[in-house]
Image (cartoon, grey):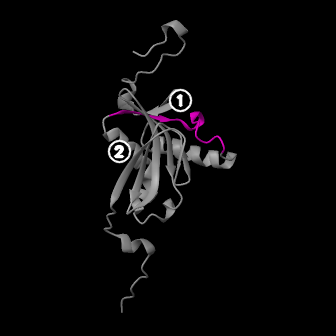
Amino acid sequence: MRESRRALPGDIYLGYHPIIRIELHRGHWQTLHSVMWTGPFSALVYLDGNCYCGMSFDLIGNDLRINQLHGVRGLNLCPYIPMRRNWGRTLVEAAHDLGFRILLVRAEHTNSWRTASPELRKRLGKRMDGTARTLGLRPMGAHWVWESDAGALHLPQLNTTPESRRFS
């Protein structure tokens, strides 16, 4: 006689497709869902009405500069397993798919964790830079960039005099 295996918690979500809502917020230093969002724009992702993650960013010309990626309290309880595991990557890829040149701030250059403990800073930095490495981004100054976007970036050149520094 064949034994049936015990149902795992994730089994009830096979084929599950959540209702996804994205909210865009404007304004620096807003606290939403227990997270301080530092950029002028923040995009928060809601699945079935619950906020699970978001990113804070600047729009400068054709560049979308991501300053912050954050999961919010309860992310590990998200019933949609792909979002629970790959939320950072999903946010960055979605931004890139909009047609912007993406600059993801490198962890050591972020300004959003000023009050975090050293342990938390290390964990957040590992997640931020780990997301960039997973996507195959390469370091360029204070940011991670897509290889295909690197030549098109309008960043100031290093080792130049202040008078000759300009965006080209």
Residue bounds of the magenta highlight: 100-115
Q: Which quadrant does the C terminus fall into?
A: top left
Residue at mark 2: 94
At mark 1, the secondary structure is: loop
Q: Image point 49% across, 7% down: which residue? A: 164
Is 28 on the left or on the right of 23, as rendered?
A: right
Three-letter code for the amino acid on which mark 2 is drawn: Ala
Q: Image point 63% across, 45% down: which residue? A: 121
The residue closer to the viewer here, 63 or 89, is 63
Note whether 80 is above or below 124 in the view shown: below
Is 34 on the left or on the right of 41, as rendered?
A: right
Residue at mark 1: 142
Residue 60 lies in magenta, yes or no? no
Q: Position of residue 33 (x, y in %)?
A: 52, 54
Q: Image point 48% across, 16% down: which residue? A: 157
Q: Position of residue 26 (x, y in %)?
A: 44, 40
Res 111 quadrant in image: top right
| Marked residue nearer the N-terminal end (2 or 1) | 2
Mark 1: few/some/many CA within 10 Å (<14, 14-19, 20+): some
Note whether 53 is above or below 133 in the view shown: below
Residue 109 lies in magenta, yes or no? yes
